[in-house]
DNA sequence: TTTATATATCTCTATATCGCGATATAACGA
DNA sequence: TCGTTATATCGCGATATAGAGATATATAAA
């Protein structure tokens, strides 16, 4: 992970809503039990809009930021877009931060 | 550490120069071998200005940000202000981030 | 084909952050 | 006391970020 990538990752985490989203995605069964689709697909954007209480466009932008940073991935199924955490990337990030700090 | 405090800490780390400063302060003997005062006092602000290559006022503001976040402490000796890392706080932060993420 | 749904993107406004020079403050030295 | 040094603070212009509504796009449903 380059220095620029690390920078992008920390900036991605520097907003509380984006940290909340990552946290929620860690236990979808706990936070998105009402999703109509199997949670094995991930969590669809609309569920996150709803939970965060912010506008659809705002959450879409936050999800894009998290994805650019590498923390999450998306998979489109039909008209929905499902998001999941990239656990390996998150672990690498924590290790790298530990070293650098 | 409250959620607001965690937020302030992450924001403090979200600027590369501030991460550099924390990194430099980890090994003062390596990065500030030319300081005229004993490194046991910490590293004085002027040395950091010089190393970072940014203006005195800019670095002073970055140091204030790091200090508000709890990552560093300062001790004034004569006309100098010496900065040191708060290792315990940094460890707590990393642990907390690991849990929350 | 029309309509509805889900999401991304565009555009705008408001606010936050960065970096700087200028100035204030404090301590020291002549 | 007066000049010098070290640092903090202020005020400003430039840029980045956040949030929202409007719109575009893609898929699905009627």
Image (spheres, coloured by chain):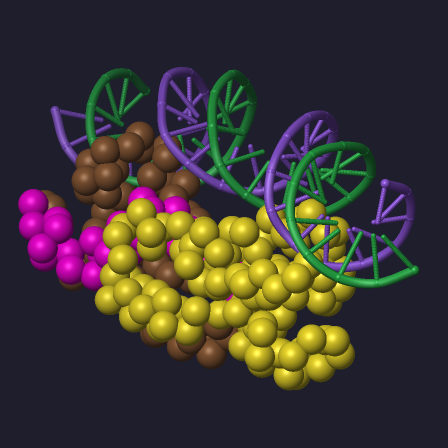
Chain colours: A yellow, B brown, C purple, D green
On the image, the x and y values in percent for residue A84 come to 53, 69
On the image, the x and y values in percent for residue C3 come to 91, 48
Helix, strand or loop: magenta stretch: helix
Residue depicted at 58% across the width and 74% down the height? A41
Position of residue B72 in the picture relative to residue A66 (left or right):
left
Q: Answer above or below: position of C1 versus A97.
A: above
| Figure quadrant of the N terminus of chain A | bottom left
Quadrant location of residue B98? Answer: bottom left
Q: Answer above or below: position of B21 versus B61.
A: below
Work out whether residue A63 or residue A6 is closer to the camera in this orientation and state it.
A63
Position of residue A92 in the picture relative to residue A35 (left or right):
left
| Figure quadrant of the C terminus of chain A | bottom left
Residue depicted at 40% across the width and 69% down the height? A90
Q: Answer above or below: position of A97 versus D15.
A: below
**Magenta span has B85?**
no
On the image, the x and y values in percent for residue A18 come to 57, 60
Work out whether residue A58 or residue A42 is closer to the camera in this orientation and state it.
A42
Work out whether residue A37 or residue C23 is closer to the camera in this orientation and state it.
A37
Can residue B1 be seen here? The reply is no
Q: Magenta stretch?
A: B5-34
Residue depicted at 24% across the width and 66% down the height? A99
**Magenta span has B12?**
yes
Position of residue D22 in the picture relative to residue A8 (left or right):
right
Work out whether residue B33 or residue A44 is closer to the camera in this orientation and state it.
A44
């Amino acid at each position: 992970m380059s220095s620029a990538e690390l920078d992008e990752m920390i900036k991605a985490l520097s907003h509380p809503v984006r940290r909340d989203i990552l946290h929620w995605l860690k236990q979808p069964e706990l936070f998105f039990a009402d999703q109509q689709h199997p949670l094995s697909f991930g969590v669809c954007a609309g569920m996150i809009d709803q939970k965060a209480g912010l506008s659809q466009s705002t959450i879409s932008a936050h999800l894009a930021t998290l994805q650019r940073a590498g923390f999450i991935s998306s998979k489109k199924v039909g008209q929905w877009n499902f998001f999941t955490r990239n656990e390996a990337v998150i672990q690498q990030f924590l290790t790298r931060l530990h070293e650098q700090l």
